[in-house]
Amino acid sequence: MEKKKNNSLAYLTIIYMIGNFSSKVLSFVLVFFMTYFLTKEEVGEYDLILTSVSFLVPCISLQIDSSLLRWLLDKTQTENKDQIFENVFGLLFRNIILYTGIYWILAIFIKWDHQMYLYIFSVLMMIFPTLQQGTRGIGKNRIYAATSVVYSLFFVFNTVIALYFFKSSVDGVLLANIIALTGVIIWLFIKNNWWKYLKLKKINLKLIKELCGYSLPLLPNTLSWWLISASTRYVILGYLGKEYNGLFAISYKIPTIVLIVTNVFTLAWQEKAIKTLNQEEAETQFTNILSGYVNLVMGIIIILVSCSKFMMQFIGKGYYESWKYIPILLFAVFLQAISAFYGAGYLRAKDTKGILYSSILGGIVTISTSFVFVQYMGLYGISLSIMLGYLVLLIFRGIHIQHFLKIKFPIINTIILTLIFIILTGLLYVENKWTFPLSLIISLIVFTIFNYKHIISLKSKVISKWKKSKSMG
C-alpha cells in the first residue's frame, strides 16, 4: 500500500511541489528584493552569468545526471547501485579536473569579470544536480525536495546579508550562491553516505559507454533548449545593451511562476511515464493527463497575464515597463511545458534522438529570428522569437511522437483558452482603474470552469484527509 502511494503521480507531484514551489517562490521574491539594490545593468550582468553557467554545466558534465536517474529507476538494470554511483561520480570528477585545467589556462591569456567566483559556481552547479538526481533515483524523494528548500533559504539569507548589510553587488550574490551550494552538497554526501563512491580508479568502461550513450544525445537537446530560452540574452547584449538585458530578465520572472508548477509536474511525470510498461495503458494515460495538463497550465497563465501589469508595480523603479513582454513569454512557457510533457514519451521509449532533433530545430528558429526581430521590435522581437522556437518544437514533437505513442491533443480547449488569453492581454493596454479587477475575475472564472473536476477532486481528498486525521486524533 505504501509503495503504491509513493509511486503515484499525485504523491510524487506533491513531494516535488513542496521542494520546488518553496525554493522557486523564495528565488522569485529574492529577485524583487535585488531590484532595489542592483541597477538594471547589474541585474543584466548577473543574468548573463547564470546564462553562461547554464551553457557550461551540461557541456562539462555530459548530462550524466540524467543517466544516473534513468539507470537507478530502471528495474531491468543488472548493475548494482554501488557500481552505477561509482562510475557516474568517477566520470563527473574526471571531467571537472579537465575543465579546471582548460579554464585556468584560458584565464592566463583572457581576462573576464568574476573569474574565481564563476569557476567555483560552475563546478558546484555540475555536482549539485547529479547528487539531487541520485537522491531521486534511490527513492529518497523527501530528501530531494528538502535540498531545494534548504539551498534556497540559505541562498536568500546570504544574499540579503550581502546586499543589505555589506552593500555588495554581483560578487556578493555569487558568493551567497556558492556558500549555499557548498553547504547543501556536503549535506547530501553525508546524508546518503556517498563518500565511499569517490573511487576514481574503479571504472566499468562498458557501463560508462551505456551511460554516455543515453546522456550524450540529451546534450545537444539541452543546448538547444539553451538556444531557445537563454541565448537571446547575448543578442540583447549585442544590440540593446546590459540595461535591456536586466529589463528582460525581470520580465521573465512572472513566467517563472508557471515553470514552478510545470517543472514540478515534469519531474513526477517523467518518473511515472518511465515506469509505465504497457503500451496501451501508456497511450491512454498520456492522452488523459495531457488534456487536464493543458487546462491547468493555460488556466495559470491566464490568471498571471491578468495580474502581470499590477505585479510590476512592486519592483524597483525603472523596471516597470518589463510588463509589456510578459504575455508573449507566458505563452512561450505554456508551449515549453507541453513540449516537456511530450519529452517524457521519448524518455520512456529511450528515444533521446527524437528530443535532440526537435530541440535543435526549435533552437535554430529562435536564434535566427531573434537577430532579425530585435532590430525592428526590440525586446518584443526577442520575446516573439522565443515563443516561435517553442511553437516549432511542440509541433515537431506532437507529430513525430505519434510514430511510437498515439497521443490525442486537446485542440478545441487549447484554441478557446488561447483566444481568452489574447483578449486579456489586450485589456492590459486599456488604461482604466476597473481593467485589472475585471480581468482577474474573468481569469479566475475561466480557471475554475476548465479545471473544475480537478478542483473538486482535490477538495474531496483534502476533506477526506482532514476527517481521517481528526478521527485518529
Image (cartoon, rainbow, N blue to C red):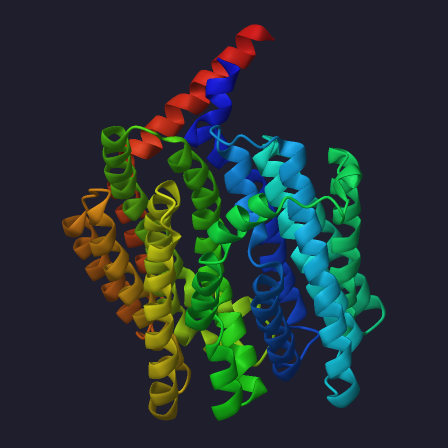
Residue at 57 percent across and 59 percent down: it is: 62
Whether residue 50 is visible to the viewer of this picture, yes or no, is: yes
The answer, for residue 160, to whether it is visible in the render is: no
Query: What residue is rendered at 33% in x and 82% in y?
Result: 369
Side (left or right) of 282 relative to 255: left
Residue 343: image location, x then y, percent: 36, 50
Q: Nearer the viewer, residue 4 or 32?
A: 4
Q: Is residue 48 above or below residue 334?
A: below
Side of 425 where 48 appears, left or right: right
Q: In which image quadrant can residue 117 be found?
A: bottom right
| Vertical comparison of 313 with 333: above or below | below
Q: Identify the residue shown where x is 43% and y is 41%.
A: 270
**Percent x, y for residue 91?**
66, 53
Among the 4 quarters of the image, the one containing residue 140: top right
Q: Quadrant of the C terminus?
A: top right
| Whether residue 379 is situated above or below residue 464 in the rendered picture | below
The residue positioned farthest toward the left in the image shown: 412
